[in-house]
Image (tube, rainbow, N blue to C red):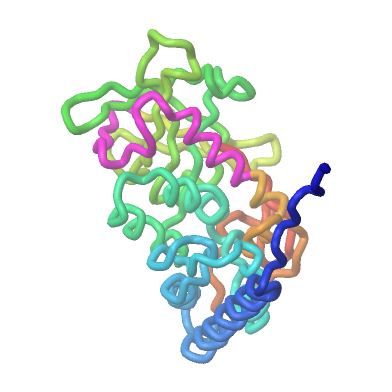
Amino acid sequence: MTLPPARRPLNPFPYRGWMSSVADADRVADLARRVVADHDPKKVPIPEYLAACYDAGLSWVHFPEGLGGLGVSRGLQAVADRILQGAGGPVPLGLNPMGYGMAAPTVREHAQSEELKKSWLRPLASTEHIWCQLFSEPGAGSDLAGLATSAVRDGDEWVLNGQKVWTSLAHRARWGLLLARSNPDVPKHKGLTYFVLDMHGPGVQTRPLRQMTGQAEFNEVYITDARIPDAHRLGEVGNGWNVAMTTLMNERSALGGSGNGAARGPSRTPWRCGPRAQTCALRCCGTGCPSCGCAPRLSG
């Protein structure tokens, strides 16, 4: 006689997952209300308010605790944002678009130590440190893997030389996400290494790219014998392409407004802008501004 297949036992706790999600949502909401109560966004400077959000784990709720998150579902970011921004707080991605949308997840995933992650993420979240993305080059736009900026190892440092172009916010950035060629003797995708570049360091020069309109929405960056400590390398040597995929996939997520509620900044959402607001990261010329809600053109 053929026996019917064994049936899986019923889940004795069918609502445990749902109850856990409700508890997480309540926790996120309580923390957000506490931040608003202790740091009224209508009265305190924006960096102070956003730093308080980071310390409470509300910058990216799905990040680990201690790194601006709570280790909960990414979807609960909307719970925090509804309270934080509903009280008059800013949309952080509009103030630090490359930082919030691309640098934060890349640093979280690939930085070499917890200390470095913390030292970069908190001032990024507060918008004290603006970030930019140094990928595109005069000869490597659509073919990113064909880039020519070189990175040569010199002890515990790397010496970089090259040029980047179409870089948004390079003139205001403190740090830049940079992809360079560390091995020219292997297939192009395999010879790349990923770094965090000090935009204020020696050998880094930023120039605006003037358009026919007279505006300068982008920049070109010249890198001449700039030195980067090996500790500021993200990912393994030669694995820069895979690290760059982390950045680019999160760029798509940020611009699409999916997941992280703060990533809704580039959409045409009304922005608060008043006399006490921080200067907009992207000037109001169709490139994104809190005062008009226009969508930024991001490049790099």
Q: Quadrant of the N terminus?
A: top right
- Is residue 71 one of those drawn in magenta? no
Point out the residue furthest to the bottom here: 37
* Side (left or right) of 232 relative to 188: left
Q: Quadrant of residue 177?
A: top left
Residue 119 lies, with reference to residue 76, above or below; the image says above
Q: Quadrant of the C terminus?
A: top right
Give, as a single range, the part of the protein colored magenta.
Answer: 224-251
Q: At 44% across and 62% down in the image, what residue appears?
A: 64
Pinpoint residue 20: horizontal percent, then vertical percent.
60, 75
Q: Nearer the viewer, residue 282 or 144?
A: 144
Q: Nearer the viewer, residue 212 or 279?
A: 279
Where does residue 86 sit, x and y in percent of width and height?
67, 80
Up-down relation of residue 157 to residue 121 (above or below) = above
State which quadrant residue 55 falls in.
bottom left
Quadrant hosting residue 13: bottom right
Judged left or right of residue 291, residue 126 is: left
Residue 273: x, y in percent?
64, 73
Residue placed at 56% from the left, 61% from the top? 95
Farthest residue, direction top: 185
Q: Is residue 238 visible?
A: yes
Residue beneath the point at 50% across and 65% down = 71
Location of residue 5 with respect to 48 vertically, above or below: above
Report the front residue among 165 and 62.
Answer: 62
Q: Is residue 241 magenta?
A: yes
Residue at the (51%, 88%) spot, across then down: 34
